[in-house]
Amino acid sequence: MQEEKNGPVKPKVYIAIVNEIEIAVYKALNTGAEILTAAGFEHLQCHTLYQKLKGCDFEKVSLDQAIDLSNPGIERFTTKGPDVFHYNVDNEPEMTDKSELTAHQILLAKGINPNNHYLIQVLTVGNVSYADNPSQPIKMICTGMDFISGKWQDLVDIEEYGKQCKPVPPAKLYRIKVDKGYHTWPKRYITVPQLIEFEYPNNTKPVEVYKFLNTSPKPIKLKPDEMVDLTEKCLVRFTIQPKEQEDGLSDDHIQEEPVEETVKIRRDFTLPEEDIEFLDNLGLLWEAIANQPGMWVMIHDYPIPVGYNVQKAEVALLISSHYPAAEIDMAYFHPSLIKVSGRTINNVFDQVIDGKNFQGWSRHRKPGEWRPGVDNIATHLCLVDNWLVKDITR
């Protein structure tokens, strides 16, 4: 550095005003990119620089354009958002001067028919599908965006995908099973009342809807106003059950003297395949025993809701020789259930089954509510769970 009498030579400083803020640079010639960088901007492609000369309007400065800051005619600089946005569709570059585009517009601009395809935004973590929202505005990002197109399926069978737990692709129609009927639906989402309408149009009776997932051993009750996503992974089917059953002693409950208890796991009779699969998936020990008299399914360590004297109990279900055409009625618990509130459980009775004293709950469907081909042990246990929860508040 050259020395003068009074010390080192100080470098020349040039002042530029960018968006009303002064910045200092140490050379006269600077590109638009250098001015933006000096002003603290990142992602330079996201900003457009303009300079104001005395007596003139603002004029655009490109990123590689050199500006002489020693020019006394320069008044100030300002910035605006980008003039164009770059993005890729199916690995091919596209650009737009609009700050927002819909998925529909992006597909059309690419020459892709939105009636046959939908748009997916590719992100670093996960993707976003616009199959159900083709008109939703997408805010364009100046640093670039990646999209791919997907082809609509004409029809997707929810039960088929659910049994295999495969991701459900977007479709023009979804085939869903409600009770024993199959129906098609043109949207990804469906409400609980709409599910009920499939099998029970103009229904006025109180009912509840359950969904079956391949990953859940027990059906899951849906809220009355719930919006159901048909593309939920492992969703298999739906069933509709009466909301309330009548209390009262049944004329056909069986009394028997105690017999010797055995610890052997017994399978004295064969159940339908769907019942065996359900019971096995519960993860609980279960038996099918006969000659008690009658045929019984015994489920050990069945969970009991909070509010009773036990957290789990053995549950017995009487199986008719005509099952599944004939209904399952009531339920039996060992040990007997007692509410911690001290309130009485109405309409219960003692029943000896397999040498143990069970507490029978006299709760019954109304005539005609059992539906062969739809109802089974799984759907009956949905009702049993409801009885248990409801009785706590009585």
Image: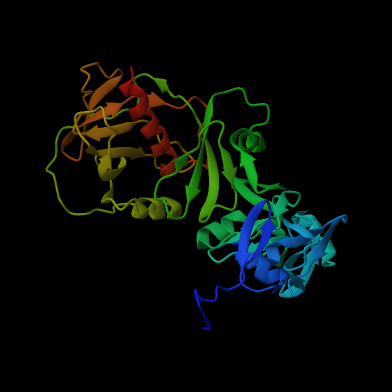
Q: Is residue 376 left or right of residue 192?
A: left
Residue 230 x, y percent position in the rendering: 60, 49
Q: Residue furthest left?
A: 260
Q: Residue furthest bottom?
A: 2
Residue 119 visible in image: yes
**On screen, 7 above or below 151?**
below
**On screen, 335 above or below 272?**
above
Query: Which residue sits at x=31%, y=28%?
Result: 253
Q: Residue furthest right?
A: 56
- Is 307 or 317 nearer to us in this picture? 307
Residue 152 visible in image: no
Instruction: Please count the marks in the image.
Output: 0
- Is 152 or 147 nearer to us in this picture? 147
Name the image colouring: rainbow
Rendering quarter of residue 89:
bottom right
Q: Is residue 264 left or right of residue 388?
A: left
- Is 32 or 176 nearer to us in this picture? 32
Residue 324 x, y percent position in the rendering: 46, 43
Query: Which residue sits at x=28%, y=50%?
Result: 284
**On screen, 332 above or below 211?**
above
Residue 55 x, y percent position in the rendering: 88, 54
Residue 386 x, y percent position in the rendering: 39, 30
Query: Which residue sits at x=28%, y=40%?
Result: 303
- Is 239 or 5 nearer to us in this picture? 5
The C terminus - image quarter? top left
Q: Residue furthest front?
A: 5
